[in-house]
Amino acid sequence: MDTTLGIDLGTQSLKVVFYDYNAREVVASASAPLEVMRDATGRAEQEAKWWLVALKQALQQVSASVRMSVRAIAVSGQQHGFVPIDGSGEVLHAVKLWCDTSTQQEADEIMEACGGRERCIELAGNPVLTGYTAPKIRWLRKHYPRKYQDMALVLLPHDYLNFVMTSRAVMEYGDASGTALLNVRNRRWSRELLRAVEPSRDLANCLPELVEPGEVIGQTTALFSQEFGLPTGIPVAPGGGDNMMAAIGTGNVVPGQLTMSLGTSGTLFAYADRPIVDPQGNIAAFCSSTGGWLPLLCTMNCTLATELMKQLLVINNAGFDAAIDAVPAASGGLIVLPFFTGERTPNLPRASASVLGLNPENCEKRHLLRATVEGATYGLRFGLDELRRLGIQSSEIVLTGGGANSRAWRQIVADICRLPVVRLAQDEGASFGAALHALWVLERQLDSGRGIGDVTREHIVRQPDLVCTPDETTSESYADGYAAYRRAVAGVAPLFETDGARA
């Protein structure tokens, strides 16, 4: 048996998937939980060493024979995290994550130094948001100057795992475009953004080499292989951010595809063969990890919000769909703005969740749960509108992420977005995408003309019996519900806006 290993370093867990590419089946998967250190300042951090512990725990759940069948590896990782490394290869500080909102001041300072939000978009394709990597670097400089001076290398979470596996520090264009330091149009570091982050030091010296998506970045070292129970000397692919790997795992590698991920965060994205830069900054102008671009909308509160509500309302997974089904579309006028940890889109990093429209008829647990699901989905529907404004069209949505396991939620997505929703037989999303990315790089060693589209066409299987088509009557109800949601966002936004963050 020959397999590729996809590793998905998420926020709440680390997952491994072993894919037998000859039999075309996932032969093993396992996961290990991760904690997040949070406080009232918006801090959200993890220790990098926790990731290695979780990786070992996940791998130990898989038999040695399967582990030794691995022929190539790729890593999918949570985007935007900041891993500062010293000259000895040691991590200097706890990793500030994508969902950390404590660096809004630093984001504002960087944009001001560049000439404002619009100027940043002109320079690099994206504004500088508090979730991105750039303000985290400035934050370390301000609060821990000694550590900052010792910083020799800036890595992202998936880059760090690559570094541990191969001893080589590199970065690929997809994940790099989420730092707010890369000019996505020419795929080069923006000198202006680098100077805005740090005017007295050349940060380019701390940024790793940028590598092409289809190349081997290195091989597993003997030290890594011995500690983690994997073969020595097997090729490691560049991998990428979790959304970039989910794009591969859902076949979103050619124009005309649309993927929605219902994970801790919610994302909606499409592949493009040219840079898609949003002058308004609502759609992130990211690169893909396959040679193209990946215009994307991100919300910070998706299953994070529904899990909090399930816990509050004492509704378990088994009762989730039944509770939602018992409530009519638009939840009797109840609206939940699920901004529990602040929000990226709309750009309200200081926001908190809101419940509006309570009355005697909808003041029930099940209404509150459905309204939370609808609120999370309305946020992603906004992304659909924005992508269409930029010329991105699709006739269906491929759904992935934990929320996609809910039949009721799948139907809500179809009805709110008025598009058919498709599920795939391989529901591992980003981890499966990483396994396919590893396979692509492995096969390119024998055939350099092998395209990622060839791999996805051959290995991704649709599930026709799980397709949800929109119900026209329900969609009409949601048209009114979505309009009410947008009015609610506009109404509460002034309560949470900062000078650098406007909804």
Image: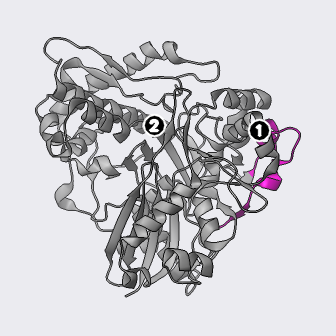
Helix, strand or loop status at disc 1: helix
Find residue 294 and report its horizontal and vertical position in percent: 53, 51
Looking at numbered disc 2 in the image, what kind of residue is underneath it?
Met
Which amino acid, mark 1? Arg
Q: Nearer the viewer, residue 144 or 121?
A: 144
Residue 207 lies in the magenta stretch: yes
Q: Is residue 397 visible?
A: no
Residue at the spot 17% in from the left edge and 35% down from the top edge: 324
Magenta extent: 189-213
- Percent position of residue 395, x then y: 33, 49
**Regarding mark 2 in the picture, which secondary structure is present there?**
loop
Spatial distance from mark 1 to mark 2, Cα to Cα? Answer: 26 Å
Q: Residue at x 31, y 38 (%)?
A: 307
* Quadrant in which residue 166 is drawn: bottom right
Question: Could you tell me which quadrant the N terminus lies in?
Answer: bottom left
- Nearer to the camera, 337 or 103: 103
Q: Nearer the viewer, mark 1 or mark 2?
A: 1
| Mark 2 crowd level (few <14, some 14–19, many ≥20, 10 Å Cα) | many
For the point 58% across and 54% down, which residue is it?
Answer: 48
Q: Which residue is mark 2?
A: 300
What residue would you read off at disc 1?
Answer: 141
